[in-house]
Amino acid sequence: MNSAFPHASSVTLVDEANRVVVERLEIARDHLARMQGLLGRHALAPGDGLYLAPCSAIHTVGMRFAIDLIFVDGGWRVVDVIRDVGPFRMVWGGWRARGVVEVGSGWLNAELVRPGSVLHLRELPPPGPAAPAAGSDARP
């Protein structure tokens, strides 16, 4: 997989109405990916994010850009949303936080993500050519 996070996999994060919250969410799958987090990156594109779990607190020591944070419990219920966390800060998501979604600061839709919202993961389609639409007369 061609990922900005070599120890992660990509999914889409949606709300209860299946509206996209984070288009390309990288899930840190191992200890190394969680330790690296967003360190070394210059920015995150709008629609991109990183999910760290288990995680109830983060730091932005060494970061080069501000981020927004969505802390979730074990059932993906939002327990806190913290916006515009600049470099060299520490943030705790609370006793119920089991994971955190990190996105670039400023583009997160406040209507879709607030404490109490329940989020869901949806797999991204595999990379490659798009399949022809149903009923199309595509020939090789």
Image (cartoon, rainbow, N blue to C red):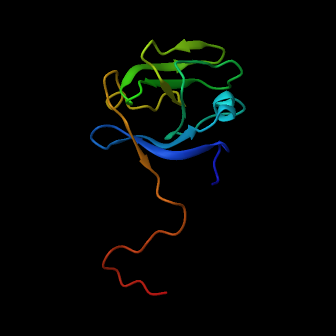
Q: Is 80 drawn above or below residue 127 in the view shown?
A: above
As rendered, which of 96 and 14 lies closer to the eye? 96
For the residue pair 102 and 105, the one nearer the viewer reads as 102
Residue sitting at x 31%, y 23% = 116
Horizontal arrangement in the rendering, residue 87 relative to residue 95 (left or right): right
The image shows residue 57, relative to residue 124, as above or below, that is above
Residue 3 lies, with reference to residue 28, above or below; the image says below
Q: In x, y percent, where is residue 104?
A: 54, 31
Foreground pick, 116 / 19: 116
* Residue 35 on image: x %, y %: 68, 28
Q: Quadrant of residue 71?
A: top left
Q: Quadrant of the N terminus?
A: bottom right
Indicate the position of residue 41 as horizontal and vertical percent values.
Answer: 68, 34
Q: Which residue is situated farthest in the bottom direction here?
A: 139
Please report the residue visible at 38 percent of the width from the left and 25 percent of the height from the top: 78
- Residue 133 position, x and y percent, is 36, 73
Question: Hey, which quadrant is residue 91 in on the image?
Answer: top right
